[in-house]
Amino acid sequence: MSLADELSWRPATELARLIRSKAVSPVELLQSCLEAIERLNSKINAICTLAAESAMAAAERAERAVMAGDKIGLLHGVPIGIKDLTPTAGIRTTFGSPLYANNVPGEDAAVVKRIKQAGAIVVGKTNTPEFGAGANTVNRVFGATRNPWDLALSVGGSSGGGAAALASGMLPLAEGTDFGGSLRVPAAFCGVVGLRPTVGLVPRYPAPLPWDVGSVHGPMARNADDAALLLEAMMGDDDGLTPISVTPLWKSLAATVAQSRDLKNLRIGYAPNIAGLGIDPEIGTACRNAAMRLDDYGARVEEIEFSVADGLEAFLVLRGVTMAVRFFESLHELEKFEPNLKGNIEAGAKLTIGDIARAERKRAELWHRWRTLFERIDLLLTPTTPVPPFPVEQNYPDTIAGRKMSSYIDWIAPTFLVTLSSLPAASAPCGHTAGGLPIGLQIIGPRFAEPKILATAKLVHEANPTVWPLIAKSAARS
């Protein structure tokens, strides 16, 4: 059996179309996904809570709606995984923490409601580090998620379970969240597309800090067209539950990206090292080549000098503030948390008003630096991660280009320095290392640049097609 014969490997846009035309039934598609999960999840540990029974009931309802000719949504009948940080009614949501190991929410998060309204079938929850505090997907409840490209390696974090489910053919779509790079880093490590949207575009209720501009919900998929379709379904009003919600300046995102065939006159800058950490030479070469190749699609590409490395401390301070406020009521029981989360909260609790003031001033300065940059270019491209996937037992890479990393988060500065200025950005597959591991190119734009970002991601991926992992191929043929 070839991958093309496996429904779970088909693009979500194609699956939605096939369901709408009655060529594929939602039940048949779900069965394909469940079979792939049964074959692979014990090896990869991407899906931490499977909701097969409720998913099948939803698929049967979806099938009846199609056969009755009812009005259906963008994702009608298409299976999806929801990150284990995002509440799901009736489906266990642990936040990767033993403190919530048996937690079953009574209400869906607003983004899940949107996804269900679009007709998608929630298959289960995807693994994450405790409360998303980790760039390697490991927790005490479910253990480690392993990379489908090499089971000895990390998937990154914190939306690692979703990325692994996509890359192994278990699911066609996944929802995730992104603060320091939690959608983008796993996307790069697993060879899929992950998009951090403009803040406020996707509802965040019931976020404990509703005015926070750091964390967002966003789409993950195996290609940019699918990511656009999922983002279009995720966006929308949540009945006033999100105080910083925004309305996009464009319409029909999925159709716009689907129709993109070139990047005529798009001004693109390529900056090789925006965080000043150094970049693995193999990754740097692949990302630069992928960026420069966009000339073939009509873009005007130039390599530029651009750095926001002076924002490293500011991000860590502001992240610390967020963690200390988020877990304020738990300051007396920090020993209950894993070291990553515990360290974040402790660092935040020790901050002074001077620390916070300097960080906010630096964030303002960097925002204007980005704003000025986007007056002369439309998008900035840079490597998503400075290193390829590392062993799953490591919390983070020890060194990058000879520079020692002092904490689990330092190495993802190329993504969190984008978060610091609340900009939208995606990671798109742009090739492979000599050892066959995927490489991600980060595509950054100003607010509401999602159509340009995803159109560019689509053509980057088209020029550098993914060769899917051997584990997925062998499993599909077994």
Image: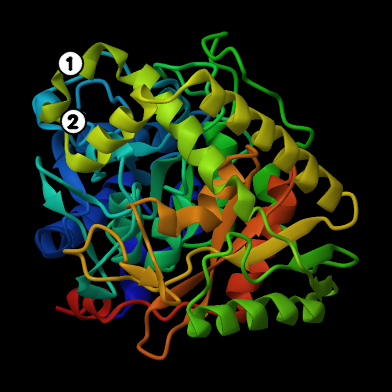
For the N terminus, give its image quadrant.
bottom left
Taking 26 as reference, is 296 left or right? right
Q: Position of residue 477 (x, y in %)?
A: 20, 79
Is 109 in front, or is 398? Answer: 398
Marks counted in the figure total: 2
Q: CA distance from mark 2 to mark 1?
A: 21 Å
Select label 2 or label 1 by which is in front.
Answer: 1
Q: Please name whichever residue, 7 or 85, is drawn nearer the observer in this view of the structure.
A: 85
Q: Residue 143, position in %: x, y?
A: 11, 50
In the image, is residue 261 above or below residue 455? Answer: below
**Image location (x, y in percent) of residue 99:** 11, 25
Q: Which residue is mark 2?
A: 94
Q: Quadrant of residue 156?
A: bottom left
Left or right relative to 38: residue 398: right
2 or 1: tag closer to the N-terminus: 2
Disc 1 marks which amino acid? His
445 vs 143, left or right, is right
Residue appearing at x 64%, y 44% in the figure: 424
| Colour convention | rainbow
Q: Position of residue 146 (x, y in %)?
A: 21, 63
Residue type at numbered disc 2? Thr
For image coordinates 63% across by 66% down, the residue present is 382
Query: For the residue labelled by badge 1, is the local secondary structure a helix, a strand or a loop?
Result: helix
Task: Compare residues 424 and 456 and report the one nearer the observer.
Answer: 424
